[in-house]
Image: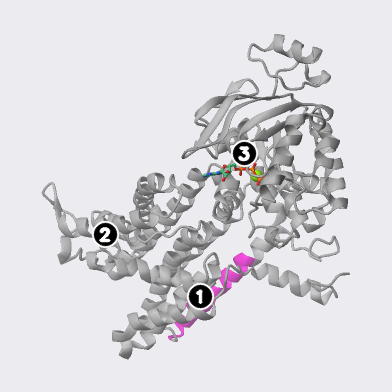
């Protein structure tokens, strides 16, 4: 609570979100202010306020259809928000496209995997490095030394990133032919290759077995420590969420119903009701 | 496995050298066949047409196979290139030079004509590509369809411009210097295919293929999809312009009716039959679909029927086309053979 009050002093727009001690002297990487979108009559997301510290792992949870993926689509401008604003590293993102936002520092994975299926695993990663490869069209077509240097560099970096997830042995395989778990991990590698400051993971553990999930959990923590980035994570696996998140926001019917530390959330009656209520409706 | 360090690799410069030698060898073969009289003048003409069609099909394959769009106005770009090169060449002394047998003196004019045809077709490509490719969906098909027809109708109707005789309308643009030879056609085919290869095996090609595979994902990793879509489409248009330039210099006369909608479809059929996304497929089917009608001239009335039948049969039994998306690499094959000889198989585990 003391930390929260401190951050509220730092920033005129109060975020009730949790801030890690090590992030306190730096502005948040992401700030959403009263974000909202309607689909026809449906308020899919509304009054969405969230701030994420530069090295914070935040969980975004909620029942099916709560609007979690829609938040990701708003943050990456797959959908244009109907209301509110998104600040990335203190800069308003109004008018930016999906590609602009990636260049500004947001990278994501998709709930329904979206790999470049017909391309090799290595090429999937290299596409994501496109903006950091300095090789113009003439250098590429005439195969000038600049091309070879850029390609060699890209290869080395792609292999480095792939080896974080133990995918280096599959570099030559077609991305679409990988097993499900490996495809999910490749999506994370591809996102990391764009050098983000904020990584959005949409149900990274979906379809993974407990052993794979445990390994993923460990890797996500390592990514944050090694790359010093913030991570916003949608996940239904409560062990994973409670295990690695510094802060959690709970979404129900498009609105945040609770925010806080994992302990706060576990004991919050509104959260328990949202989950049990939705389970009752389904049965 | 190919990722093993034990796999013997041919280094890149050597690969290029092998390819250059193979191309030179192919040219030596063709020219010695011409000198020996095996390839008659009649067949020389057919070979030039094959070359032009290879450039057309391989360039359309960039848009259809690699980019995943469906342009229906490739003949329009060919027409633009053909007419601009022809009008330029007629204004130069190239005709005199070629008639008097000093082809080498006409070379600068030929190079300029190729550049002009590529440039003009490229400009039209940008004008059409940018508005159509900014949108997601199949708008390009409709817009290019309209473009092809507009170009043809315009050429038919502006026979003169500002008092100068311009395209000569439906009567046809005649007495174009016949600057296209089997030699310069061969060189342009090699250069075009080389350009496509270099483009596609670079970061630009990777981005283009990524846009085809998943546009949203490509955007999410920072790829400017409009830029790469336009780039692929413009390169495709420029090469079609060059094919048009060769066509004008081969026939010596141009008629707007050549560049009807059916011509665009003919090129598309070559790409689809060869396998979308396979350059080798485009080359083979362009060659076969050019030579076959010549051999079966007696049945020329049924050509369109045969095309349609062929397409239907193909779609039933091999919907991915002759080659699928497979691309052939001669040096890859040689590498494979070397490794086999050394006792390593491509699929073997050791
Ligand atoms: N493009 C769209 N058009 C109309 N409605 C949409 C669209 N996208 C999402 N919705 C609706 O918005 C609501 C939130 O969907 P969303 O996919 O964000 O849920 P979610 O929290 O990610 O659920 P899940 O856990 O199942 O992935 C749902 O009711 C969904 O039907
Ligand atoms: Mg979702």
Decide if residue A139 is in sight here: no
Disc 3 versus disc 1: distance between alpha carbons? 51 Å
Alpha-carbon distance for marks 3 and 2?
A: 47 Å
Q: Reading the chain from its start, which is encountered first: label 1 or label 2?
A: 2
Same-chain status of marks 3 and 2: no
Look at 63% across and 43% down and name the residue there.
A65
Residue placed farthest to the top in the image?
A: A9
Residue at numbered disc 2: B149
Q: In terms of image quadrants, where is residue B308?
A: bottom left
Residue count near mark 1 (Cα–Cα under 10 Å), binned few <14, some 14–19, many ≥20: many
Q: Would you place residue B94 above or below residue B181 in this image?
A: above
Label 2 secondary element: helix
- Residue that badge 1 annotates: B284
Q: Is residue B184 magenta?
A: no
| Depth order, front residue of A223/B45 | A223
The lab-note entry on whether marks 1 and 2 share a chain reads yes
* Stretch in magenta: B19-37
Badge 2 residue CB within 8 Å of ligand 1: no
Q: Dot 3, how many residues are within 10 Å of its Cα: few (below 14), some (14-19), or many (20+)?
A: many
């Amino acid at each position: 609570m003391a930390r929260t009050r401190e951050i509220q002093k730092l920033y005129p727009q109060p975020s009730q979100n949790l801030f890690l001690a090590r992030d306190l002297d730096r502005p948040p990487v992401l700030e959403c202010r009263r974000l909202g979108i309607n689909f026809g009559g449906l308020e899919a997301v509304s009054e969405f306020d969230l701030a994420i510290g530069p090295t914070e792992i935040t969980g975004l949870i909620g029942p099916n259809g709560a609007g979690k993926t829609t938040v990701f689509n708003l943050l990456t401008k797959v959908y244009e928000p109907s209301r509110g604003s998104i600040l990335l590293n203190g800069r308003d993102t109004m008018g930016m496209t999906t590609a602009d936002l990636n260049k500004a520092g947001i990278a994501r994975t998709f709930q329904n995997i979206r790999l470049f299926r017909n391309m090799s695993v290595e090429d999937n990663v290299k596409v994501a490095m496109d903006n950091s490869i300095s090789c113009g069209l003439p250098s590429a077509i005439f195969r000038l030394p600049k091309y070879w240097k850029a390609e060699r560099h890209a290869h080395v970096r792609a292999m480095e990133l792939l080896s974080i997830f133990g995918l280096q042995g599959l570099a030559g395989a077609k991305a679409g032919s990988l097993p499900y778990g490996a495809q999910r991990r490749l999506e994370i590698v591809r996102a990391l290759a764009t050098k983000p400051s904020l990584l959005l993971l949409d149900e990274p553990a979906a379809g993974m077995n407990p052993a794979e999930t445990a390994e993923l959990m460990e890797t996500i923590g390592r990514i944050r420590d090694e790359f010093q980035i913030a991570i916003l994570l949608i996940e239904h696996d409560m062990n994973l969420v409670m295990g690695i998140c510094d802060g959690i926001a709970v979404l129900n019917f498009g609105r945040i119903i609770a925010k806080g530390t994992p302990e706060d959330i576990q004991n919050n009656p509104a959260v328990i009701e949202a989950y049990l209520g939705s389970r009752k409706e389904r049965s | 496995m190919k990722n093993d360090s034990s796999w013997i690799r041919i280094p890149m410069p050597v690969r290029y050298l092998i390819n250059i030698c193979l191309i030179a060898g192919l040219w030596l073969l063709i020219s010695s066949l011409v000198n020996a009289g095996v390839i008659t003048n009649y067949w020389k003409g057919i070979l030039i047409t094959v070359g032009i069609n290879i450039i057309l099909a391989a360039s359309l394959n960039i848009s259809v196979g690699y980019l995943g769009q469906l342009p229906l106005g490739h003949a329009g770009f060919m027409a633009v290139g053909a007419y601009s090169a022809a009008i330029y060449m007629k204004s130069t002394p190239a005709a005199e030079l070629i008639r008097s047998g000093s082809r080498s003196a006409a070379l600068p004019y030929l190079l300029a004509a190729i550049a002009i045809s590529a440039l003009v077709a490229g400009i039209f490509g940008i004008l059409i590509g940018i508005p159509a490719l900014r949108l997601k969906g199949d708008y390009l098909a409709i817009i290019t369809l309209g473009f092809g027809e507009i170009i043809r109708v315009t050429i038919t109707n502006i026979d003169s411009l500002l008092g100068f005789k311009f395209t000569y309308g439906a009567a046809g643009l005649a007495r174009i210097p016949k600057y296209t030879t089997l030699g310069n056609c061969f060189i342009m085919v090699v250069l075009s295919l080389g350009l496509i290869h270099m483009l596609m095996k670079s970061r630009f090609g990777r981005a283009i293929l990524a846009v085809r595979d998943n546009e949203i994902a490509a955007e999410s990793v920072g790829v400017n999809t409009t830029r790469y879509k336009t780039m692929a489409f413009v390169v495709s248009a420029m090469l079609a312009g060059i094919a048009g330039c060769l066509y004008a210099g081969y026939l010596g006369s141009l008629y707007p009716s050549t560049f009807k909608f059916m011509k665009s479809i003919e090129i598309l059929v070559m790409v689809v039959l060869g396998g979308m996304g396979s350059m080798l497929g485009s080359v083979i089917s362009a060659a076969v679909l050019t030579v076959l009608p010549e051999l079966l001239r007696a049945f020329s009335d049924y050509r369109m029927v045969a095309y349609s039948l062929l397409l239907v049969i193909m779609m039933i039994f091999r919907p991915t086309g002759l080659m699928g998306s497979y691309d052939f690499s001669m040096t890859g094959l040689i590498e494979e053979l070397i490794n086999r000889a050394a006792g390593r198989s491509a699929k073997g585990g050791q």
